[in-house]
Image: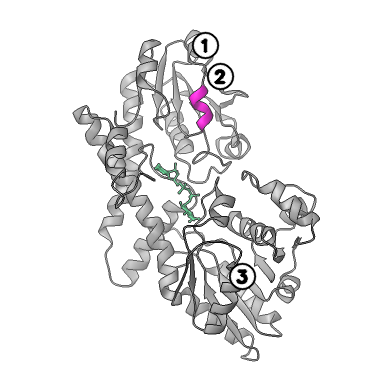
Amino acid sequence: MKICIIGTGYVGLVTGTCFAEVGHDVVCVDNDPAKVKILRSGGMPIYEPGLAEMVKRNVDASRLRFTESTPEGVQHGDVIFIAVPTPPHADGSVDLSFIEKVAREIAGCLTQHKVVVDKSTVPVKTGDKVVETIKRYSKGKVEFDVVSNPEFLREGFAIEDFLKPDRIVIGVRSERAVAVMRELYKPIPAPLIVTDINSAELIKHAANSFLALKISYINAVSAICEASGANVIEVANGIGMDARIGRRFLDAGLGYGGSCFPKDLSAFIKISEQLGYDFRLLREVQRINSDQMDRFLKKIIETLWVAKDKTLGVLGLAFKQNTDDVRQSPAIDLCQRLLEEGARLRVYDPQAMGKARAVLKDRVVYVDSMDDVAIGCDALVIATEWPEFKKLNLARAKEVMTHPILFDGRNLLDPAELQRLGFVYKSIGR
Ligand code: UGA
């Protein structure tokens, strides 16, 4: 099928590339000339495992190309995906101006029936607005369908999540659109749920909020574990084996971050408020999330007594493993807070050094290798759950550190091993 994807961020680029991979003919549009230039020259604007190779393969096979021109993309696609950012306003509500602009642009280029699919995360009832806008700006001349098709991929696992999803959600108004969407997703083996547009939009905010709630739940339990001497990992394993609960997203840590959960929770609370419901539960989820960072910071400061002028090594800057994304990263937040305390920081991340540099500037020392971070440090801090941090050379770290103290914000290391090596070791909920 001929597809156009408008917006080549994480979601748009992965969606376009994966649709090309399963055999569709895809044109990706982005209004940022620099990004289009990078993609056309075989480069990658983001780090996502496996994506660069997949883009190259599909570009070489002429199933995938990139353009700055929305009219060119719209003309090409029978199905047009909107995958542009929906950033937050200061009050937590969603800025839908990019969606509105794209809807107008699509309307201006319509010459025959198209299915316009919203993949961006949007508040319930946005689909109605998109329909209204396209009608208004196309002057009602051409037939079209609007579909809501929320995306559930995680950064760092995006290709796998896209090609092997738990489910595909399609919110529609017409049978014609259902048929097109079924055909489009035929190569992807997953249950397809067909709903009305409002429900599909709501599924996305409700799903992300529930996952954030799950993380806050285990983080709250971790506080009780610390106070009682229990072990949060044992508790998570014990409750997670109940199939009704499930073990995934029960890893206690520094709280959730990233470009989705914090924004989507605020949005869902705001949407609920506008619809007359006070979603107190979700406000508590947010509070637990910020408490979690406060508790960890307190642990560091209490152990060091004074953080001022101490040298701390921070392992991990990305908001989670397998990504170079530092947006709303708990690791960056922790760095900022330690800097405010007057600490000196040596930092390392396997992928996110470039993006972190843009935020932390020259206020920290960037170290090229994981094992060299420890040199001259009063303490080490693990802030992101990169699996390679489990292979840290601890014996060497102990030799090159001023004091063998390690704060593990992601429960990556084994407390018994650290104790055997003579470290003061503090982690989360155990
Ligand atoms: C999240 C959702 O998981 C995706 O389903 C959704 O499509 C995406 O948002 C989106 O709306 O676009 P993502 O933000 O990429 O995906 O990352 P997650 O893997 O969900 O992690 C989010 C945060 O939660 C990270 O900071 C991570 O470290 C933290 N986390 C995750 C925990 O602290 N504990 C866990 O057990 C799991």
Cβ of mark 1 under 8 Å from ligand 1: the answer is no
Residue of label 1: 396
- Tell me the amino acid under the disc marked 2: Asp
Mark 3–mark 2 Cα distance, whole angstroms, equals 47 Å
The answer to whether the residues at label 3 and label 2 have Cβ atoms under 8 Å apart is no
Mark 3–mark 1 Cα distance, whole angstroms, equals 54 Å
Magenta segment main secondary structure:
helix
- Tell me the amino acid under the disc marked 1: Arg
The answer to whether the residues at label 1 and label 2 have Cβ atoms under 8 Å apart is yes
What is the quadrant of residue 430 in the picture? top left
Tell me residue 416's x, y (percent): 35, 17
Residue of label 3: 184
Tell me residue 253's x, y (percent): 38, 36
Image quarter of the N terminus? bottom right
Q: Nearer the viewer, mark 3 or mark 2?
A: 3
Label of residue 371 in the image: 2
Identify which residue, 271 or 25, lies in the foreground.
25
